[in-house]
Image (spheres, rainbow, N blue to C red):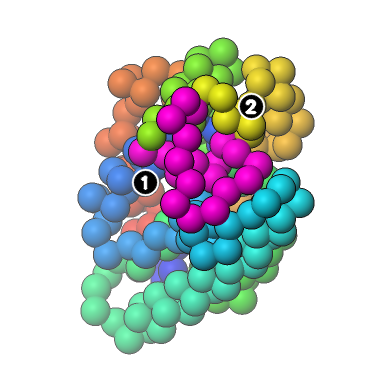
Amino acid sequence: MSGTVLVLVAGLPGTGKSRLCARIQERFPGCAQVSIDDIKERLWEEYGFDDIEQKQDLERKALGIFFNEIDAALNRDTRSSDAGGGSAPPLVLSDYPFSAKQLGTLKALCKHHGATALTIRLTADLAVLFERQRRRDLDPARHLGHIVVRYHPGDTLEDRSSATGLLTRDEFYRRCTTRGYDTFQLGDLLEVDATDLEAVDYEEILSWIAARSLAP
């Protein structure tokens, strides 16, 4: 296979996408990673937000930056591939609960750069995911901007369970069943049940990526 491979780790929130990305980076150390959440957090630290409307404005700005960074990564890696230097094409990696909102632009970028897309779609039992997502949101290591409707650099919240932006179980279920997180696909698809993270066969996933990345 010639050209860049765009690996999209998609699926429902709380399915362990970051954990899988870390494994992919270990197996393919030269891959470039672009993260929408990282971009959001940078913008929150730069601008802050006073209400949900301002937060949504920054999220739209983050999506635009994300597409620009994917474009740049595909362009850079395409030029690297054209220059030779190895039998394996370069990889660009990204993870997010992707939906139709991102599909059209990602598809167009792949077509423009002659890149091949692979989608790993993680699924799991919603009851398990809600509890896992709640634990992650309450973790002090997670950026506070994810769970509040007002944030400015330096803000802290001792009791995260009182955060204004925490999702209720009903809202979490609604998002998971109506936003298309569980149907997103660009390119070849591998669907993985991540209800039990310890049971996920990461070697099988990595072999699946390698087989399609190295295919003639």
User: From this viewpoint, is residue 66 visible?
Assistant: no
Which contiguous range is marked in magenta? 141-160
Residue 12: x, y in percent?
57, 32
Residue 131: x, y in percent?
50, 17
Amino acid type, residue under disc 2 in the picture: Leu
Amino acid type, residue under disc 1 in the picture: Cys
| Quadrant where the image shows the C terminus | bottom left
Kindly identify the residue that appears in the image at 33 percent across and 62 percent down. 31
Q: Alpha-carbon distance for marks 1 and 2?
A: 25 Å
User: From this viewpoint, is residue 60 visible?
Assistant: yes
Judging from the image, what secondary structure is the residue with disc 1 in? helix
Q: Name the residue under label 2.
A: 167
Judging from the image, what secondary structure is the residue with disc 2 in? loop
Q: In which quarter of the image is residue 59?
A: bottom right
Q: Which of 45 and 19 is in front in this view?
A: 45
Q: Name the residue under label 1.
A: 21
Residue 161: x, y in percent?
52, 22
